[in-house]
Image (spheres, helix red, strand yellow):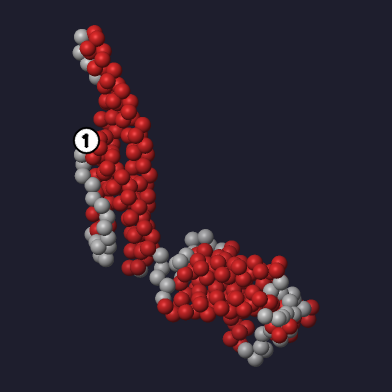
Amino acid sequence: MLMDNKIILYKAIFADAKELKAQLEELKNSLQNLEPLFYQGTLRALINMLNDGDLVKPLSQSIKLTNLIADIQRKLTAYNELRDRVNNLSGIFSYNIPSVTIDTQIAEVKANIDNAIRGCSIIMSICENLIKPQVSPESLDRLNQLRTEVEKIEIYLPDDKQFLTKNITEAIEEYEQGHLLASALIAARVIMYVYEQIPIEDDSRQTNSDTNEQKVMTLIKKGIINKESRDEKESFIKASKMARNTLSHRADAFPLIDEALSLVASAVTFCRYYKDLLGIKESNIPL
């Protein structure tokens, strides 16, 4: 629960930084557009005063610029407050997040806007790294093993089925980046594609009404799954259910780090099942 609360906090800070960055960029563009008009208006007023002897009237551009700088100052203050929030979080204070001053000189204001925009980008990057799950060395080793298995299977699949191994490779890469949902979704669609390709024998329909069990029986009959291996049968059924749930149920559910890795591993296994279903024997294909 503590970890979940931290993730929520980091996501909130990320959202605040992203929104503030967009607002600062908009104000920067407004300042760039308004600044030349201000100087032009001031010059025209001085010329009119010299020619006509009139007092300089309040310039609308000057008022706009004053209001704009006031808006910028408020956003720069908000940025400093956001920066303090980040620096007060344990383990983050060592990051070099620029601070800004609240000035009225246009040159200083422009420089501070640029620093604040850069600071928001740094804060967003920090939060992304904190939100992203840390992949353990053991998981990385397992992913490397799975990648090697995929490369072996890929050699034997026909060209029009290469998308299966391509999907698994994508799932592995997404997992390595900490993108668990993307990894799980990609792996799940490989599993369900293979699942749908497994035929159901007529006698299986008569003896068992469970579709998962029927498909397991097909794989057993074809010698793809060992009849005596209870673990392999249970893994098939578990992976099928998990993949189906990942793709079609509960949009508010997100895979845990172990669940995503399990789906990736199952995708490799199902891909191997599919190769065997096609009747491809490794000894029949020259390397």
Q: Residue at x 28, y 29 (%)?
A: 65
Residue 114 versus residue 138 in the image, above or below? above
| Picture quarter with the C terminus | bottom right
Label 1: which secondary element: loop
Q: Residue 155: x and y, percent?
A: 66, 76
Q: Residue at x 36, y 58 (%)?
A: 125
Relative depth, front residue between 41 and 222: 41
* Dot 1 amino acid type: Gln
Q: Residue furthest right?
A: 202
Q: Residue 141: x and y, percent?
A: 47, 79
| Picture quarter with the N terminus | bottom left
Residue 154 versus residue 179 in the image, above or below? below
Q: Residue at x 29, y 47 (%)?
A: 115
Residue 69 shows in this picture: yes
Q: Residue at x 24, y 61 (%)?
A: 93
Residue 217 shows in this picture: no
For disc 1, the marked residue is 105
